[in-house]
Amino acid sequence: MGFELDYIFNPKSVAVAGASESPDKTGHTYFKNLLDEFPGKVYPINIRAPEILGVPTFQSIRDLPEDVDYVISAIPNRDVLDLVDACISKNVKTLHLFTARFSETGYEKETKLEQDMLDMAAKGGIRIIGPNCMGLYNPRLGISWGKGFPREVGNIGVISQSGSNGGDIVSEGAIRGLRFTKVISYGNALDLNEADFIEYLADDPETEVIGAYIEGVRDGARFAKALRYASAKKPVCLLKGGRTDAGTSMVSSHTASLAGAREVWEAMCRQTGAINTYSMDELLDMLVAFSRMSKATGNRVLVGGGAGGKSVTSADECEEEGLALQPIPDDIRNELTEQDPFFGPWVTNPVDSSIMGGSNLKPHEVIEFIAKSPKYDVVINTVSAGGPWGGHDPARQQRASRILEHTIGISQNLGKPVALVLSESIPESREQYEVNLELRHKCIEQGFAIFPSMGRASRAISRLVRYYIWRTAELEELKARNSK
Amino acid sequence: MGFELDYIFNPKSVAVAGASESPDKTGHTYFKNLLDEFPGKVYPINIRAPEILGVPTFQSIRDLPEDVDYVISAIPNRDVLDLVDACISKNVKTLHLFTARFSETGYEKETKLEQDMLDMAAKGGIRIIGPNCMGLYNPRLGISWGKGFPREVGNIGVISQSGSNGGDIVSEGAIRGLRFTKVISYGNALDLNEADFIEYLADDPETEVIGAYIEGVRDGARFAKALRYASAKKPVCLLKGGRTDAGTSMVSSHTASLAGAREVWEAMCRQTGAINTYSMDELLDMLVAFSRMSKATGNRVLVGGGAGGKSVTSADECEEEGLALQPIPDDIRNELTEQDPFFGPWVTNPVDSSIMGGSNLKPHEVIEFIAKSPKYDVVINTVSAGGPWGGHDPARQQRASRILEHTIGISQNLGKPVALVLSESIPESREQYEVNLELRHKCIEQGFAIFPSMGRASRAISRLVRYYIWRTAELEELKARNSK
């Protein structure tokens, strides 16, 4: 459906118009990233500097010795018509415009310039990403707009109408173990738009999960169709910018998009199976859940709550988010009571680790032991090597290691979907920072989905379960329809 | 009303029954903290060790050379009746029991032991904190259960039925600049209970804001009366553990409390003016807002959104939480347009700093300039020295410093309540960790309330405004009633 656009995301040669010598300029970052990482031909275009980072420049695209697939524009808006003309002369397939100040200014002159540019490009057979956007991050190919985005390729494809939100998804996601196939910041969506990109990512075999930050939709019916097509193949997690009057007004000056009513958007998500979110944190949580947890098709949860108070608040938050805290099943209860007649009958779900001091039961072992029951579909465990304030406590670090070890057991030996709650708070002491970072790395290396709080974990898991239930029904309906 | 209990929180001498030589034991931490910080007499009680941390022990409270005000019990539950008897012989006023395994076990024998202990203490004139709790953190006096809780005294009083949640409030709050007057972990609330503590903190002149984590209420009518009394004097922020079936069941095995229906609790909060929250994060956010922001009595907000996408999501989140994003007033707009005819008309609220590159307007100055308008009651600004992934970027660090400098201007020169959004994410690089920690310290030193996201900031501020509006009306009603 959308995979014909694959050439857009996999150019063989790239030129940067407005490549800059100054490290503070985005025109420098684009070129430097390509020079460091992109295996194909890379050309810097600059009318003044004779060379950039040791590479001789060209004054214009017209001066290039051969055709070029992809051009990144970081030049002022007044020069874009000439640029498009030059691009046509070199058979450029895709023009990405970091260049901004078009229709989003709200001014007539700039809006007309944008339209003229589109008309000229369309006649010349050039597709446009943007304008007013950061463009493409394709780690497999070594194209990136960020300073230090991860080099590794992942399983998440993202489209973002905002460059800063797209960058935040990469950066905030990276520390939670997220890696990406392609991230596309597409700004004003003048030519290629959200529906094109969603269709493409739906068909992209590398992409297993899709995330999107969208401010406005060009063609509602086509977009809904693309969403339905994509959602039946893989989870699509959306964040809509411009849900309110204030947001809608802001959208118009940001990407000149027409934001629609919140109710219409929510109805479209329900009908297409797309997962709608209301903040960047929630969008990231859903990407973490879908890209790092195995399929969960039931909501019966076993929780390791840490201490007593946390176990209480965990129980509330899980139930309020729609998860079912199954009591300890009788057979498991009997075995626990055999192991310890005083503590066995007292063990609860969430498992309160603070009650077991001096007993025959070890909290980290108990949760793995209970998890083997088929009554539990999914497990959330809590791991902490110490609070963000106060000295480092080696005993807590050891406890965290033991809990992690047994949680790996649940995930590997029982094959159940598992999430970990791991604090995100920035510690006051350097020593605790190092300890927390090491623990975080271990959790990520073991493949766990990590969440900063029980509330956010339970909300994400509840929505993950609902999506898989929806998709199973959707596929069965499709099968039934096809067999008629 | 409750200030007669002041002696409970300000003992002149303390004995630790079950003071331990082993640094991993809580009986050690209590004693070590007292030894290091408490100015009065401190006695370690231990039946085996002749001395602890160089201090000669006593075998029993009975052997002490003089009376003692306050006893901390870290001995096994089977020995508590003898301990109470010994305490009576030394005119002990308060007994705090870290000792657990009473009614919370659900067992008959342990429940009876708890009741016998209460009866004996009551006859002997001893008040009980607990059992099954961490007890008192009074930084002014140097009593603490934590390893490394802040020494500084603050303006927040906290009661927590859970020791771990109480500790988390201190630790997670400390890195956001929160400091405390007294924090009381009170577990099973056998004698002194939530109403006693709320009344006390209401009358405590040092305490300006009250926070509470409560699992069950002993006497609903008395508690509601205490809440109303306290709320009219200072903000009371509550987190209820045991709102759901699962939570209620967990509460019973944690502190043997009877959790009530969520609807009853919510109605009580509405009627008494108490601020009800649904997670530890939200409780902390309200303590940050009330203890670190000046009084805001209107919801018209000016927002510094950072870049474009963030400005859009910020607008949505503020409006969804009930804040009013006032457009830029005409007089301010005219002045901005005089400064820059192209960019002036384009400036929005939230202020999108990414559009102003190369203009006569500087984003950090623009927000201070707009804030002077009386159309804005409160300001939320965004500050970031770089994302959590990727290399450190000195240019972003400089921008953060400039933004902070001008936000200080808004707070100091205009006297408006200001909140800052500052990411909490743990950075991947040590260099960025140091930079972020330094920025965080600066924000805290300047007295700002900091929030990890715009959504959480706007929610907290919206509730802060509603509380002050409620209290103003409440006080006027009271005045009108008294003048009749």
Image (cartoon, coloured by chain):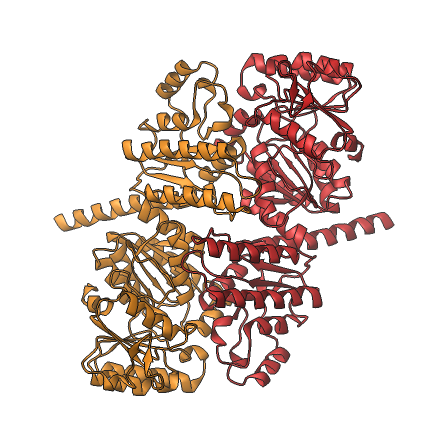
Chain colours: A red, B orange
| Residue closest to the eye, B431 or B472 | B431
* Numbered-mark total: 0
The answer to whether one can see residue A466 in this image is no
| Residue closest to the eye, A79 or B371 | A79
Left or right of A473 on screen, residue B140? left
In x, y percent, where is residue A141?
73, 36
In x, y percent, where is residue B11?
22, 70
Left or right of B41 on screen, residue B386? right
Q: Is residue B375 above or below residue B205?
A: above
Instruction: Identify which residue is drawn at 50% across, 76% down.
Output: A356
Left or right of B218 on screen, residue A205? right
Instruction: Identify which residue is drawn at 74% across, 18% down.
Output: A122
Instruction: Identify which residue is drawn at 57% across, 12% down.
Output: A109
The answer to whether one can see residue A149 in this image is yes
| Residue closest to the eye, A151 or A275 | A151
Position of the N terminus of chain A, as image quadrant, is top right
Quadrant for residue B113, please give it: bottom left
Instruction: Identify which residue is drawn at 58% across, 61% down.
Output: A323
Q: Residue furthest left?
A: B483
| Residue closest to the eye, B464 or A25 | A25
In x, y percent, where is residue B453?
47, 43
Quadrant for residue B54, please give it: bottom left
Q: Is residue B53 above or below residue A471?
A: below
Q: Residue furthest right?
A: A483
In x, y percent, where is residue A433?
49, 54
